[in-house]
Amino acid sequence: MKNLSRLVISTTVIALCVSVLPILNAAPTARAGAICPKKGSVQVVGSKKFTCKAVGKKLLWDKGVAVPKKVPTPAPTPTPSPSSTSAPTESAPQVAIDTKWYAWNFRYNSAGTLERKGGPVTNWSSDSNRPGQTIDPIREKAFEEIQRYSKTATSKPGVVNFAFGPNVDSGVEAAYRKYFNSSIKFFESRIPTGTVLNVIVTSEKDDEFTKTSLAKFLGNQSQANDFFKRYEPEIRQFSSLGKQWSGGGSVSNYGPGQPLLYFGYVCSCFNSEDILMPNVSHEITHYFQFATTPSVRKQNFVGNYPDWVEGKVYIPNSIMEGSANTLGAAILVQHVGWYSDMMDWNLGRYKNNGKIKTIASTEEAVALMKATKSWNLEPLGLGELNYSLGQLIWEYYIANYGMESYLTLFDNIEKYGDIEMALQKTENISESDFYQKAAPYVMKAFNAVTS
């Protein structure tokens, strides 16, 4: 969830005309008495709705109120999608999917096999756990494309510098290294030679280490202190709450030819099973996106927050965050059911907190897709829709045009300067026509998940 502090970071970047672009994926779960991001913001966890309120000089979640259970509304039957001979065929409308508000835990067992548990699955398992699951052929095709590319991608040496806080558990460090190395290998052959990624993972007990590591990366202690101050509320929650959420992280871009930074934060109490695995592959997708489009402006605002005005969008926010969700859910897992579970969980999380619960028509789907190009969705009342709707848009793209096409699309964004020309050069389709083609699937997949 994009909170005020993160938005202020982006505002500062724009005002100073410096290409520093933090992008976050994971947000802390609301809990009575915990620090919250913005007065008046609301988050539903389980059967309670929590509201962010001012308590003295702090912003804290209240005790929460019970939320009545909702009866899922059957998804409407969408208009069939036009498709080429190579495009996957859509299935009949899906049965409503109840995400049940659980996140999956992952671990590598002693044999090096990835296992998971969560929700109704109480034991660690490397099986799909969902026999007989009905998954739309478009989703299956997207996953197949991602897995196929993963098996054929060639790697080349990259420069990745790891720095783990002294109070980060050794098992957490080992898991992060494995997740990072596997995710980077997926994109490595497409990362420009000479690109450097610095990885800092810290805990609530590692303040001095964090400031020193940031200063080493930024080359300026004052800037490091400022960076730390911005992210300190995220880290500090572990001091009072302990193991209440799975941490998070972001990738920041400091300009063409400069190293990129992954800044992650975990609880000192975590073991390897507590970290949010999809966050790593989500953020490494940003690493690829930033590394391949260094000269293309990501945000384009005039004025000061909250009264700024957005100019032309060269790279839609929906492709940056949405496709990072898609690939983040798929790169490190081996079962389409696991991938589908995480996609539905991401979407269900948004729908539970957001205002858009159902998309009534393909026309509305197209309008929302165009709206989620924006880098500032709050004034539109769309919150995190760029993540959830975006993941469906670019899932459809990968299913229909392939993983290689998605990667080439970013090469063409850099070459031609914006998404419209890149789509024309990559697949000979206009941006508007692509949204029209994707609309039936996006509408159906969005409506199938209950909140």
Image (cartoon, rainbow, N blue to C red):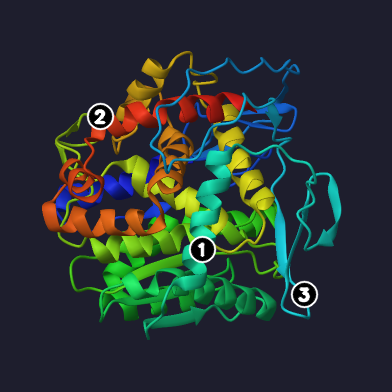
Is residue 312 rendered to the left or right of residue 351?
A: left
Is residue 196 rendered to the left or right of residue 247?
A: left
- Give the residue at mark 3: 109
Q: Earlier in the sequence, mark 1 or mark 3?
A: 3
Q: How many residues crowd mark 1 within 10 Å: few (<14), some (14–19), many (20+)?
A: few
Q: Nearer the viewer, mark 1 or mark 3?
A: 1
The residue shown at (63%, 59%) is 239
- Give the residue at mark 1: 148
- Give the residue at mark 2: 432
Spatial CA span between label 1 and label 3: 24 Å
Q: Amino acid at mark 2?
A: Ser
Spatial CA span between label 1 and label 2: 29 Å
Asked whether the residues under the numbered discs 1 and 2 touch, taking CB atoms below 8 Å apart as contact, a structural biologist would say no
Query: Secondary structure under badge 1?
Result: helix
Q: Amino acid at mark 1?
A: Arg
Q: Nearer the viewer, mark 3 or mark 2?
A: 2
Q: Quadrant of the C terminus?
A: top right
Question: Which of 131 and 250 lies nearest the eye of the viewer?
Answer: 131
Q: Is residue 52 above or below residue 132?
A: above
Q: Position of residue 394 (x, y in %)?
A: 41, 43
